């Protein structure tokens, strides 16, 4: 799987590079440049946490890890509350008792639950318009309900047993359930808590970057037990090189799939913007969040629900995993893409059950109101 992805990325690099030489006539050259333009933002969100990984691991090993070990759980699951590319993977490696569990927690759990907690929810609630915040909150709740599908698929592809997957995910899924209930019932309070959490996280990121840069300048990184800042920057640059090819390839796929997506959208009741949103989310959820205002109600819910598992599946997350542990590529893609599609299926099923319940309660008046709304 990883070899196939690498070949596709090379095709994308060639496609983007040639188009850039020709003056960006097809748009692929712009995507090629965008990969390098993303380095500053990625560095700010990743380098500081990677530099502090050893310190955070030490604190968790002395604090929560002993309790989890008593319960026969691998402490690596604690790293799943950070995004895979924001120090989650490195932290899982440090905390893991079982290396397989370390890879699973750092990559599959971090790319799903971790990314949702530290990136998608706080950024999304700040980006979407006020009238779309209810759709966003409900979509996140539905996505969290479908997250077990993604975690189970990723666990099986990582080499874990079903029993191990279910037991090790008790803590993460409990937190996910609390977040879902909070967004559904106490959205204002929940978002205030997330806002405070993100502010603390940003301070930690900046402290790590500052001390990492100072330690590098003074040549004392090893003495302090810090991950060298250049090593952390190497991870960022490796991701950028991967994106040189994956961004143009994604643009090509978007063009090739435009007609089939439009046809499929008509069959399931989604507009073309909503259908395109799924593919865009696989690269980055940010453009999809910006497009929510142009989607129909069903498209808004389905896209946000898919986002919980599927965000950055063929973008930054795939690039990161390819740079640190290529053998986990299949587990990542299976978890994010299959898990995301199953989540959309669950969302569709819940929607139909809800519609049927309303029809029984309100009769023809509900059906007439639905027709007027559409």
Image (cartoon, rainbow, N blue to C red):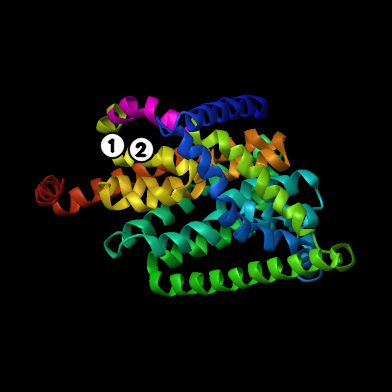
Q: Is residue 362 above or below residue 70?
A: above
Quadrant assignment, res 160: top right
What mark, if any, has residue 272 been given in the picture?
Answer: 1
Residue under the image location 74 percent in, 65 percent down: 213
State the image coordinates of residue 45 (x, y, percent, origin top left). 60, 59
10 left or right of 27 in image: right
Residue under the image location 48 percent in, 53 percent down: 144
Q: In this view, does 148 lie above or below 227?
A: above
- Name the one closer to the observer, 345 or 190: 190
Q: Is residue 50 above or below residue 368?
A: below
- Whether residue 259 appears in magenta in the rendering, the answer is yes
| Residues drawn in magenta | 250-262
Count of marks, rendered view: 2
What mark, if any, has residue 294 been given in the picture?
Answer: none
Q: Residue furthest right?
A: 223
Mark 2 Cα within 10 Å, few/some/many (few <14, many 20+)?
A: many
* Residue 150 in view, yes or no: yes
Q: Are marks 2 and 1 in contact (CB under 8 Å)?
A: yes
Give the main secondary structure of the magenta stretch.
helix
- Whether residue 256 appears in magenta in the rendering, the answer is yes
Regarding mark 1 in the picture, which secondary structure is present there? Answer: helix
Q: How far apart are marks 2 and 1 (CA)?
A: 6 Å
Q: Give the residue number, with chain letter if any, for mark 2.
A: 276
26 left or right of 79 in image: left
Quadrant assignment, res 141: bottom left
Regarding mark 2 in the picture, which secondary structure is present there? Answer: helix
361 left or right of 2 in image: left
* Residue 320 in view, yes or no: no
Tell me the quarter of the image containing the C terminus: top left
State the image coordinates of residue 263 (x, y, percent, origin top left). 28, 27
């Amino acid at each position: 799987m990883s070899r196939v992805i690498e070949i596709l990325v090379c095709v994308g690099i060639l496609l983007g590079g040639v188009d850039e030489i020709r003056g960006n006539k097809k748009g692929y050259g712009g995507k090629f440049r965008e990969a390098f333009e993303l380095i500053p933002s990625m560095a700010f969100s990743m380098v500081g946490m990677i530099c502090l990984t050893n310190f955070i691991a030490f604190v968790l090993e002395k604090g929560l890890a002993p309790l989890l070990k008593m319960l026969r759980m691998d402490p690596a699951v604690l790293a799943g509350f950070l995004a895979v590319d924001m120090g989650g993977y490195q932290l899982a490696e440090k905390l893991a008792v079982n290396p397989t569990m370390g890879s699973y927690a750092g990559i599959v759990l971090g790319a799903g639950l971790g990314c949702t907690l530290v990136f998608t929810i706080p950024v999304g609630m700040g980006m979407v318009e006020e009238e779309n915040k209810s759709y966003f909150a409900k979509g996140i709740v539905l996505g969290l309900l479908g997250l077990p599908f993604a975690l189970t698929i990723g666990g099986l592809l990582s080499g874990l047993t079903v029993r191990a997957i279910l037991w090790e995910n008790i803590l993460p899924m409990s937190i996910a359930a609390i977040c879902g209930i909070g967004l559904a019932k106490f959205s204002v309070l929940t978002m205030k808590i997330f806002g405070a959490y993100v502010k603390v996280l940003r301070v930690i990121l900046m402290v790590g970057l500052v001390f990492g840069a100072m330690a590098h300048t003074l040549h004392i990184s090893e003495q302090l037990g810090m991950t060298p800042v250049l090593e952390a920057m190497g991870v960022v640059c490796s991701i950028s090189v991967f994106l040189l090819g994956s961004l143009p390839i994604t643009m090509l796929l978007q063009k090739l799939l435009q007609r089939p997506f439009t046809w499929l959208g008509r069959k399931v009741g989604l507009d073309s913007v909503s259908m395109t949103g799924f593919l865009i989310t696989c690269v980055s959820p940010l453009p999809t969040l910006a497009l929510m205002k142009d989607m129909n109600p069903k498209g808004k819910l389905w896209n946000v629900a898919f986002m919980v598992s599927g965000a950055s599946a063929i973008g930054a997350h795939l690039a990161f995993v390819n740079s640190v542990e290529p053998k986990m590529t299949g587990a990542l893609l299976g978890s994010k893409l299959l898990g995301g599609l199953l989540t959309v299926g669950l969302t569709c099923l819940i929607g139909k059950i809800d519609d049927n319940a309303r029809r029984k309660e309100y009769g023809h008046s509900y059906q007439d109101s639905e027709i007027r709304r559409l």
